[in-house]
Image (cartoon, helix red, strand yellow):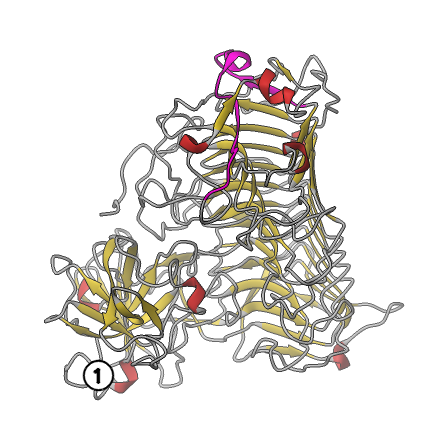
Amino acid sequence: MQFRAGTYFLPATEIFTAADSGTAATEIVYQNYPGESPAISGGVRVQNWINVSGNTWKATLPASTRYFEQLFYNGVRRLRPRLGGYLGTYYRFVGPVYLNAPPPPASAPEPNCQVYITGSGWQCFDRFLYNPADPISLWRNLAPPAGNPCGQPAGNPALTGDIELVDFEKYSTPKLRISCVDPASNIVYLTGSPLTYAVFANVQGFLPNHRYLIENVQDQLTQPGQWFLDRSTTPWMLTYLAASGENPNADTVIVPQVTEILVASNLQYVTFLGLTFEHDNYTLPAAGEAVPDLGLNITAAVSFQNSQHITFDSGVVAHTSGGGLEFISCITAQSPSWCIFRSTSAVTSGNVVSNSALYDLGFVGIRIGMPALYGQTDANIPQFNTVENNVVEGYGRVFPDTSGIRQGEGHDNTYTHNEVYDGYHAAIALCFCSGDTRLTPDSHDNIVSFNHVYDLFQGISNDGGSIYIQTANFVSPMPAGNRILNNRVHDVSDASALDADGYGGEGVYIDTLTGLVDVENNLVYRVSASPMNFSSAPANPSEANTIKNNIFAFGRLSMVAEGDAYLSGTVPPSQIQVFVATNNLFYFDRSSASSPGFYVQSGGAYSGGFAFTTWEQWNSNLYWRTDGGFASDAHAFHVQPYPNTTTPCYYDPSKWTFLTLAAWQSLGEDIQSVVQDPGFANPSYPADDYSLPKGSPGIGFVVFDPSQAGPGGPIPGSIHPRFPRRFPRRISIPRRISSTLTVGFGAFAENPSLTVGAPMQRQHWRVYSRLLPPGR
């Protein structure tokens, strides 16, 4: 079936079932008519605007209109009014609210105040203290429910939670709805809670001096490009403030209406070729979204469930309210609520996403599988799927703490030759499968290779890796065969410019208890933390990770970071080796005297009384600091000779014993390593040329070509050059990570014009020198 040019507006989700399948011999193809670009939209065009005054336009919506939270004007996402300007202003929590009530074993005084903090009381997670100097008010569209704790008159029940809040925690960004405001006590109450488990109380909730944004405040409708949906009237009224030269009657204004555009269940042997899908209508639940990074409740515009041998080729998924494209297994009642059919014998395999562009995405770009759920087995999780030669750009526009490509549990999947950029967290993330230790992770033999990922975190979020993997727990066998190969990773910046406790802009990140990962032939440079990071040791002995033949350059804090190797709080009876690092090139321009201090190997340095080589093994590496002084540096390496009194590892350099390279080698580390200039062609910005014109510098390093990372074939269309910024930022993009770095890249930034073609290459790097609305 061929589609002619034009936009096809769907009145409802298009559903495919097993009855719509082809066969191995006779595949069914839905494609564009040659040379034309049809689009399938879940939105409607808003027409019949009235210019009521100046740049203010209003449209009366049909009674059948569904609630929506996004609007697209001539293909560009426009913003609802935020507190403090078009982008909004970051305000800072004073802190959480505590209730004074008897401590445990007494029961919690309220359902959302379940965590007792000694000396403070019961911490609440559905309310926070705000600074009375902040412009919190009893806004026009604030609709407190009847009997609200603020003592305010009840508002229109249809508008409860109309105003939203984005909460920037340590490593998550819940999006919640405001219930009411108590100006006498300076407390904002919410309709839901961001807390998921009490153990996370120190990193979730309303941390003192952390940022928040408030969105959809009717009183703030003052800036060109803003819009507001007034549901207090019958029928609903949509207001738009036009920018110079805009006329919504002549231009195209689309609002989403259909929650998911296409959903397929048990479909086989079908190809979707050259089609565009856009304008799904995911909206925030009544209680908000507590953990948007996992996406357990966030739908995708195009969803393939329990499907096999599906090909999505040369397509586009864009302008979404939720996620982009997904292949998931629907197994039990714990599977996503949008599953059409559930079966423990489900199979999601043999699917291909290729040569496609996914951009301007509310959530994740491509999702393969879900996090660990009961009922998942090696047989029914996604497997033998391929994501190849795609561009994922501008993801997390609604829920910033997400990934461009994300896999839940799955095995034998391949992610190769993709370009992922302009996001606020990880580019490619595998699993996060620690979950409940009763679950058996099956995420083995996945390959992440030849991907080009960059412009990540952008000074907005924390604690993540550009390429991330976490597949283990304490009780299950370690999944083997996961490989991270030949990727190019650069320009990664955490939120430390905005937040005093900002951290964690990593390159490759191997998370909790994960082992047996092979990291080879990657180029990682200009990151605000470390090119290579481990949050802990593997779960068991003989599960060391392999770090081989990589180029790591211009890390701000270290080259390789090691977190808490002893999650149990004690040293195990036999040593657990974290990694073996060989044949790598380490290139840096910082030292322990820099601010902040830089160390080649950072973090935990206590080997538990065992030989250091049994904990971390380093050998045949090349080190070069650009001032040429590393060979004689008395602080080149370090160990921690004695355990901490509470947990084994100190993270305090004053507790370390520092070593020159020669002293380090006397411990058996880096016996065959050297200090010498590797001879890169021109590693400085903007050339970023890490080629080796004179060949291998020795130490067993095998030359590889970083330019092979990224798409190698044609991609449809052009990525729009004018996506609006979505978050305010304090911004200074460095020419390289240095001691003068102000961390932060573009947050929901305008993108340089980028035409996608063969081969796909970065056109240019825009440096922002001005300050946008800063944190307070």
- Drawn side of residue 255 relative to residue 570, left or right: left
The residue at the far right in this view is 25
Number of marks: 1
Instruction: Identify the residue at image location x=22%, y=56%.
Output: 223
**Residue 116: x percent and y percent?**
33, 70
Disc 1 residue type (three-letter): Asn
Q: Nearer the viewer, residue 309 or 653?
A: 653
Q: Nearer the viewer, residue 233 or 549?
A: 549
Does the magenta portion include 625?
Answer: yes
Q: Is residue 457 visible?
A: yes
Quadrant of the image for the N terminus?
bottom right
Label 1 sits on residue: 148
Residue 371, picture quadrant: bottom right
Q: Is residue 454 visible?
A: no
**Residue 768: x percent and y percent?**
35, 34
Q: Is residue 248 above or below residue 598?
A: below
Instruction: Identify the residue at image location x=20%, y=84%.
Output: 155
Disc 1, SS: loop
**Residue 62: x percent and y percent?**
36, 82
Q: Is residue 674 above or below residue 265?
A: above
- Drawn side of residue 409 relative to residue 553, left or right: right
Q: Nearer the viewer, residue 108 or 34?
A: 108
Instruction: Identify the residue at image location x=22%, y=70%.
Output: 188
The residue at the far bottom in this view is 146
Part of the protein shown in magenta:
621-644
Residue 305, picture quadrant: bottom right
**Residue 706: x percent and y percent?**
65, 30
Q: Nearer the viewer, residue 600 or 158?
A: 600
Residue 757, picture quadrant: top right
Q: Is residue 118 above or below residue 664?
A: below
